[in-house]
Image: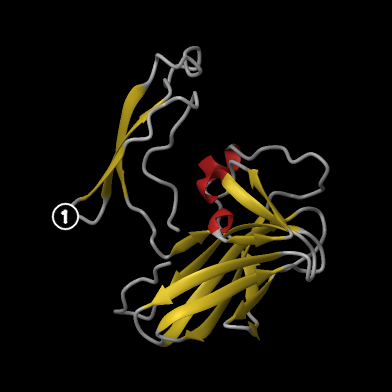
Amino acid sequence: MGSAHPVQKIGNSRAGWTQALVLRPDGQLLHITSSGSTDPARSRNASANEILFNVASVNFNRYEAESAGQRGSAIMRDGSMSNGVKSRLGAQDVGKLTFNVHVPAAGRYTLAVEYAGIGFDSTPRLAINGTAVTGSVAPAPVDPERAARRARDLGTRGTGEHKLLTTAAELRAGDNTIEILGGDYALDVDYLEITPPAGSPPARP
């Protein structure tokens, strides 16, 4: 769950895993972690680890596709996606991503799924607690910096344009199961974002 961490590890796989997260009075998180060297020439040298730190806001309403239960999908790296990762979802009933979400109060929540096609017109489907729900589709705003990091996806005819499937639906207090199901063709899913009614605390896994 959540948007990208304030600090992203880089370099060798032997960098330490010790991390610290401190909530600041302004609501942002101070993130401190060890990582491979920021110098590309030394990044794979196990003796050249560094301590990195950064302060940033983290979106706790966002659930990354790669963190969902996976069926008929493949987790892939893509710099244009939130957190730099996506799930390629199989078409129709082959692919399914399952999110187990806990909300403190029943209410009408806004759900948004960011996704991208791979060369064919395809829209994911949504189900909440076993019931299909419909929504509207619109172009998604893409951060120019993220878009510039987009990896060339060989074997597809995707344009790289992101879309948002948005709906408003009732969630029950406590545990809910939200599923993203395949469309007519395979597609790439970035994240599910759940916005609570005004004044409500965020959902949690």
Q: Residue at x 56, y 61 (%)?
A: 68
| Picture quadrant of residue 164 | bottom right
Q: Tag 1: residue type?
A: Pro
Query: Quarter of the image containing the N terminus?
Result: bottom left
All told, the count of numbered labels is: 1
What x and y, as percent, mark residue 46? 45, 17
Disc 1 on helix, strand or loop? loop
What x and y, as percent, mark residue 181? 69, 70
Q: Residue at x 56, y 74 (%)?
A: 178
| Picture quadrant of residue 191 | bottom right
Q: Is 88 on the left-hand or right-hand side of 199?
A: right
Q: Is 190 on the left-hand or right-hand side of 95?
A: left
Q: Which class describes the residues within 10 Å of circle 1: few (<14), some (14-19), or many (20+)? A: few
What x and y, as percent, mark residue 77? 62, 42
Q: Which residue is at the front of the view, 118 or 95? A: 95
Query: Quarter of the image containing the C terminus?
Result: bottom left
Q: Is 126 on the left-hand or right-hand side of 153?
A: left
Q: Residue at x 47, y 29 (%)?
A: 10
Q: Residue at x 38, y 34 (%)?
A: 17
- The residue that label 1 is drawn on is 25
What x and y, as percent, mark residue 104? 34, 79
119 lies above or below 18: below
97 lies above or below 26: below
Q: Is 148 on the left-hand or right-hand side of 47?
A: right
123 lies above or below 116: below
Kindly give the residue lying farthest to the left in the view shown: 25
